[in-house]
Image: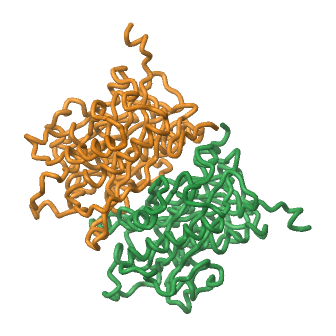
Chain colours: A orange, B green
Amino acid sequence: MDQQVGLGSLCFAKAPFIIGTASVVGTKEGEGPLADAFDCIGPDDKFGQQTWEAAESSLQKEALTLALGKADQKPEDMRYLFAGDLLGQLIASSFGLKTFEIPLFGLYGACSTCGEALALSAMTVAAGYADRVAAVTSSHFASAEKQFRFPLEYANQRPVSATWTVTGGGAFILSKDAKQPLAKVAGVTTGKIVDYGIKDSMNMGAVMAPAAAELIAQNLTDFKRKPEDYDRIITGDLGEVGQQILFDLLLKKGMDIRKQHEDCGMLIFDSQTQGTGSGGSGCGCAASVLSAHFLPKLASGELKRILFVPTGALLSTVSFNEGQTIPGIAHGVVLESCVSSAKKEG
Amino acid sequence: MDQQVGLGSLCFAKAPFIIGTASVVGTKEGEGPLADAFDCIGPDDKFGQQTWEAAESSLQKEALTLALGKADQKPEDMRYLFAGDLLGQLIASSFGLKTFEIPLFGLYGACSTCGEALALSAMTVAAGYADRVAAVTSSHFASAEKQFRFPLEYANQRPVSATWTVTGGGAFILSKDAKQPLAKVAGVTTGKIVDYGIKDSMNMGAVMAPAAAELIAQNLTDFKRKPEDYDRIITGDLGEVGQQILFDLLLKKGMDIRKQHEDCGMLIFDSQTQGTGSGGSGCGCAASVLSAHFLPKLASGELKRILFVPTGALLSTVSFNEGQTIPGIAHGVVLESCVSSAKKEG
């Protein structure tokens, strides 16, 4: 019962394992720096559907199907599904996942949803409530633009501070036991809503950086760790603008994470050649990059321990148009390699 | 580790307690049959705010503040907050709860969110992840009409099968120990998405009844119980139309719950005199009726054991306008009185 760590974290007595994962992305992501790592790159961004929302549902369904297959599991082996997306009333998840017939907890944490889903999945397995569960999140550039900004046909211009919503999804299978785990979820840190009063919906990095800074500081304090105790501290989609703010905020707290920090949004696109502004964003950004890029490095032992911190901006067009600020939130997940040092070096 | 019951339920080895609750509702709810039971009836439906969305945030904030006070707890005593509402991107919760600065899990299960929040809250406390947590959900007639149907100014007509979104919210404080608990959360049953292919957004009862039927059947099967093992089986907002469908579906499975069933949506309004169609609906309906009407009966020992089953319809205006069906979901929570029979009879 000594799993509560500090004021905001949990350290699992029996850490659950990630035994399978898959990533599915769109064409632009398939032309970016991580192209070779993704499991599936759609031939177009419609994924065989008539609407952008149905396309997002389709890529979420594909991600879970692939992850189940790679983990050698059937849908009925999953006791629970933790899932969410960016769309109002989570329609990408509802329509993407209904055919699996798995008891569902629908989640919304904006672009931090992947962290929220992994945290609750790990909590559920570690508590003995399930032997195996799945976590799935997604986003789609076109459905998100329609939801939050303008329909694509309007062809609006964007400032360089704007991020580019990733068309993609990631699925993760968690299990209480594993023969060849990809990694284990050692702990979680759950974020509060942090509101610095920013109202610029074209600068999500600035909105989310304070939430990321508070979460990382909370995690380091709760676990009594220094930044160098992590091989990587990975944010979801702060982008170039948000990264600088994150560094500044943490340096003021006496924490220097510049050597450890990477941002999924900065990894998935080459902003210089792909015109993606400050970087990638969306629930699907952190999920697909964790799945395709970081989990293999934990599986091989190249990385020993990472802090994965997807970040979300809490707004809707309604709150934005009514003049509200844009609060941020972040969810942290501590992932550790299951490969022992001796084994790797030997 | 023997907490997994059947295919879809959990039975807690150490059942968490509900140690405080509060309900806040609008004017129409304050003129209904349960008027005397609510903690707070707003003087108008704006709750001192300029917009309907801010009004909903305000009532959610008031509900949590009152519940904390009644439980003699401070916000910082809550390790986690589980919250959600009906609005896109959960803006009622984000803006209503940000000042509490409690680590937040944002949830979306449409009108079933109260059950989802109570389930995850109970799972978290029972696992030893927190000593105390809070669950909060809300809905508002005017913000919901704007979100899902038409702005109020349009004055659209509604068929009698339509339900009336409750302006209200409920908050619940869960704790691992209690001196004078209101009730304990003995177990939960988590619902799958159930889609009967209905496309009529003015008949939510028909959309949600199949999900409620499957959940109740799953609960009775998992716990090896008969309907009479519950003093009440309480759905969230099926209304009169949905109730009939629920009875029919369960009778086909050989389960007759007609003696035990009550529906929060049918209790909160007097449809004959209040013009509320099939009954009340929304996250705030089940939450406020559980808080104001049923929890006191469990606290007094008048009810010994109930199955609380809020139901949700998974749609957005986007999915609806694109011709999608409306799937349903339900979340079940088993609540038991902490008053022993001897004590009550004595």
Marker count (numbered): 0
Is B108 situated above or below B205?
above
- Residue B81 % position (x, y): 52, 56
- Left or right: B99 in relation to A165: right
- Left or right: A328 in relation to A179: left
- Residue B16 % position (x, y): 67, 52
Is B144 situated above or below A269?
below
**Residue toward you, B26 or A94:** B26
- Residue A308 % position (x, y): 37, 38
Residue, x 20% and y 29% (percent of image)? A36
**Residue toward you, A243 or B176:** A243
Residue, x 53% and y 53% (percent of image)? B80
For the question of whether residue B9 can be seen, the reply is: no
- Left or right: B277 in relation to A285: right
In which quadrant of the rendered image does the N terminus of chain B lie? Answer: top right
Q: Residue furthest right?
A: B346
**Residue toward you, B182 or A7:** A7
- Residue B21 % position (x, y): 62, 67
Residue, x 52% and y 77% (percent of image)? B241
Residue, x 25% and y 43% (percent of image)? A243
Q: Residue furthest bottom?
A: B273
Quadrant position of residue A144: bottom left
For the question of whether residue A183 can be seen, the reply is: yes
- Left or right: A51 in relation to B249: left
Quadrant position of residue A324: bottom left
